[in-house]
Amino acid sequence: MWTRNTAPQRALPLWPLYAMFAAMPLWWLLGGLYLGWALFGMLLAVVLLTHGKVVWPPGSALWFVLVGLVLISATRLEKASGLLVYGLRLGFVLTAFVVYLYVYTAARQGARWERLFQPVLLYWLGMVALGWVGVLAPRLALTTPVESLLPDGLAGQRMIRAVTHVHSTEFNPTGRNPYFRTAAPYPYTNNWGTGFALLVPCVLAYLSAVRTGPLRRVLVVSLPLALVPAFLTLNRGMFIGLGVGLAYLGLRALLRGDVRLIGTITAGVAVAWVITLVVPVGDMIMNRVENTDSTRDRADLYRQTLDAVLRSPLLGYGAPRSADTTTGAEPLGTQGQVWLTMYSHGVPALLALLALLVVLVRSTAVAVSAAGRWLSVVPVVALALAPFYGFTDMNLSVMFFAIGLAVAAVDGPVNRELPTAASRPSPV
């Protein structure tokens, strides 16, 4: 619940959000995107705390519970060396919370909707551009400045190398019929698919609210272009998450008799179907399923993860751990946010995370404009993706950037300085 602050406040500056989200391709190229993301969170926190009273959005109490449980779970780490990876994941969680507070507070203080929304949309454009780098140069891999500066022992760790030695695609040479799958700016293709599923509703929200301007024209072009690298991820979970989100929005539109929104959803699905005539994504996914053991490996990983959680249900193990008996290549507690949270931080932490997302689904469900309704899809997509893909990375910040925009407007009047009448966005 938000608190009205009647004392005069300086408006929160938006440049930290632009430096963080809009400049994402630069940080990726330097190799510091993952390792430096929490530094941006610290910057946002300092600016937020020095610009007056913080306005607490819905779900803040659950956020504190979740962060507290994550912190306590550090006592379960097996080795001191695990603190690095644990700290990296903790940084992503804390940064997402700060992004949520920052965006929400900036909107409540009267930041222009159009300008406040732009950083995450520029992040989308950067992600699509790097996705096309993977399409056109699938073998591209670079030794980055950050990787070169790290000590050999640190740079050689699997996770650190994955996030500092950048590459345009993910390629599994052990597959019987391997594909180059879209990955950049992420180390793994599943992260790209997660980002895509979370950001598509954001783009459609902006297009439904802002009717003119160069950014709108670029975004209109970017949506069909993004489908090619999206299909090349071969992410089944991405299609499930986005499909659940669209079904949720479509059902609500049907119950209200919102013909326009139903038409928009239908048109989007039709465009995606046309793209499949060029990119035979269905055949490629079936081929991958038939020629890899990913489904069997996941099932084995999930079974062993559950067995391990039963031995430490309250606090988990602090971080994923390797297991010699698994047939898959990934450690226990990976391949899904549900499994990562439950294994690393315990069942109570998982319940806190799921409760947070449910609260946000309920909070954003009262949106009345097309833009607000599109943004209300984001926590629904997150819930649908959680069993399959993890999002303790930049995607968690992307998610709560969008949710912060949505709940700020549905919580009460927002005194924004609106653009000109020709491009005036509708209230959420």
Image (cartoon, rainbow, N blue to C red):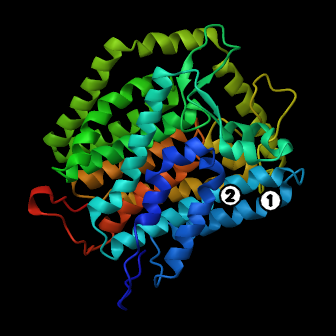
The part of the image, by quadrant, that contains residue 165 is top right
Residue 318 in sight in this render: no
The residue that label 1 is drawn on is 74
Task: Look at the numbered discs 1 and 2 and tell me whether their residues touch, using CB distance below 8 Å.
Answer: yes
Among the two numbered marks 1 and 2 on one chain, the one whose residue lies closer to the N terminus = 1
- In this rendered view, identify the residue nearer to me: 257 or 413: 413
When the figure is inspected, residue 7 is found, relative to residue 286, above or below; the finding is below
Image quarter (top left, top right, bottom left or bottom right) of the C terminus? bottom left
Q: Label 1 crowding class (10 Å Cα cut-off): few <14, some 14-19, many 20+?
A: many
Residue 334 in sight in this render: yes
Image quarter (top left, top right, bottom left or bottom right) of the N terminus? bottom left
59 sits left or right of 262 in the view: right
Which amino acid type is shown beneath numbered disc 1? Answer: Ala
The residue that label 2 is drawn on is 90
Q: Secondary structure at mark 2?
A: helix
Question: Residue 143 shows which numbered tag?
Answer: none
When the figure is inspected, residue 262 is found, relative to residue 182, above or below; the finding is below
Percent position of residue 259, x then y: 14, 40
Q: CA distance from mark 1 to mark 2?
A: 10 Å
183 sits left or right of 252 in the view: right
Percent position of residue 293, x then y: 67, 16
